[in-house]
Amino acid sequence: MIGSIFQLHVTSCPKNFTPYDERMLRWLALVLLGLLLNGAGLSLLAWAAHQKFSAGGEWFWSGTLAIALCNAGICCLVGSQKSESRT
């Protein structure tokens, strides 16, 4: 009896039904990737700045990678908005 309560019966659903449009999934993937890259870049940038000013440690390559990650994140965010505005 309980099994029949939780069964989902959808009779009017078309055969080629997709719950999300491909553009929406692409937008979501680019936004999430952009936010992750931007956050990782800013965190690494803070660590590189701490290394530079605390003990004069190795900071140059980590700072360079941080700037590249931040730029990649911003490019993903801008690219997601650009693909959305074309429709």
Image: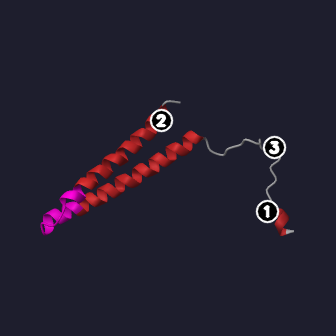
Residue furthest to the front: 61
- Check the image and report above or below for 30 versus 39: above
- Which of the labelled discs sits on residue 6, or is there none? 1
Q: Picture quarter containing residue 65?
A: bottom left
Measure how far apart labels 1 and 3 are at the Cα level. 18 Å
Q: Position of residue 28 (x, y in %)?
A: 51, 47
Q: Inspect the magenta stretch and tell me whether residue 31 lies in it.
A: no
Of the residues shown, which amino acid type is indicated by label 2?
A: Ser
Q: Within 10 Å of the Cα at label 1, are there few (<14), some (14-19), or many (20+) other Cα atoms?
A: few
Q: Residue at x 79, y 62 (%)?
A: 6
- Check the image and report above or below for 1 versus 41: below
Q: Residue at x 45, y 47 (%)?
A: 31
Of the residues shown, which amino acid type is indicated by label 1?
A: Phe
Dot 2: element:
helix
Q: Position of residue 22 (x, y in %)?
A: 58, 41
> Magenta segment, which residues?
48-63
Magenta residues, dominant SS class: helix
Q: Earlier in the sequence, mark 1 or mark 3?
A: 1
Measure how far apart labels 2 and 1 are at the Cα level. 39 Å
Which residue is more in the foreground, 85 or 64? 64
Q: Which residue is mark 3?
A: 12
- Indicate left or right for 66 with 3 as reference: left
- Which of the labelled discs sits on residue 17, or is there none? none
Q: Which residue is mark 2?
A: 83
Q: Earlier in the sequence, mark 3 or mark 2?
A: 3
Q: Within 10 Å of the Cα at label 3, are there few (<14), some (14-19), or many (20+) other Cα atoms?
A: few
